[in-house]
Amino acid sequence: MRIRELADDDWPQVWDIVREVVRAEETFVYDPAMAEDQARLIWIESPPGRTVVAVDSDRVVGTAKMGPNRPGPGKHVATASFMVASGSRGRGVGRALCTDALRWAAGQGFAGMQFNAVVETNQAAVDLYRRLGFDVIGTVPRAFQHPVLGRVGLHVMYHEFGRR
């Protein structure tokens, strides 16, 4: 598996992943009825951000987007989002994507990386982010409507670069 910049012809496979993840309504706050053109606008970052894919052979197995978390006085903190195809979960794709995003952000001079809305019941993601140096700095209670568990919290997680 390798991680590389998104190419135009990757989009159909990325859309398959985005559609699957968003329609499951378990981990992302995106509208499950979102159309492909809306997804493309949301997922493909413009500079200074970037969008990447994790590729196994010729198949896209995951994708990530990253960039500044906020403009202006908040532009020194990065953010990122990750999606992995259901058949590729548990194989290190998410770890590879997150590690790539952290390296990129540190290399771009960001002071840290913040995740604004990690669903607290997404234990695999929460555990991975903690192992990679993130802390839960707060939880918004009952801010996410999970299709099975009802209202659950959204964590805000942060990794400050150069402090670990």
Image (cartoon, grey):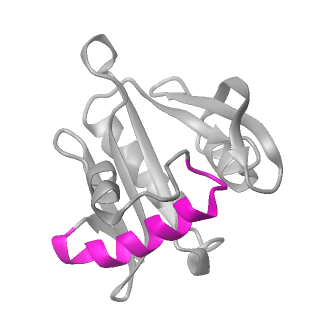
Relative placement, left or right, of 22 versus 90 is left
Q: Which residues are magenta?
A: 7-28
Q: Residue drawn 81% across and 56% down?
A: 148
Q: Write down the quadrant of residue 142 in the picture.
A: top right
Please identify the quadrant where the N terminus is shown.
bottom left
Q: Nearer the viewer, residue 60 or 95?
A: 60
For residue 20: magenta?
A: yes
Q: Write down the quadrant of residue 71 in the picture.
A: top left
Please identify the quadrant where the C terminus is shown.
top right
In this picture, is 19 found above or below 38? below
* Residue 133 location (% of width, % of height): 59, 37
Q: Residue drawn 24% across and 42% down?
A: 49
Q: Residue drawn 60% across and 34% down?
A: 134
Looking at the image, the residue that sits furthest to the top is 73
* Residue 81 location (% of width, % of height): 45, 48
Relative placement, left or right, of 76 versus 136 is left
Q: Nearer the viewer, residue 95 or 60?
A: 60
User: What predominant SS class does the magenta segment belong to?
Assistant: helix
For residue 129: magenta?
A: no
In this picture, is 25 found above or below 161? below
* Residue 160 location (% of width, % of height): 49, 25
Q: Residue drawn 67% across and 55% down?
A: 26
Q: Write down the quadrant of residue 68 in the picture.
A: top left
* Residue 75 location (% of width, % of height): 29, 21
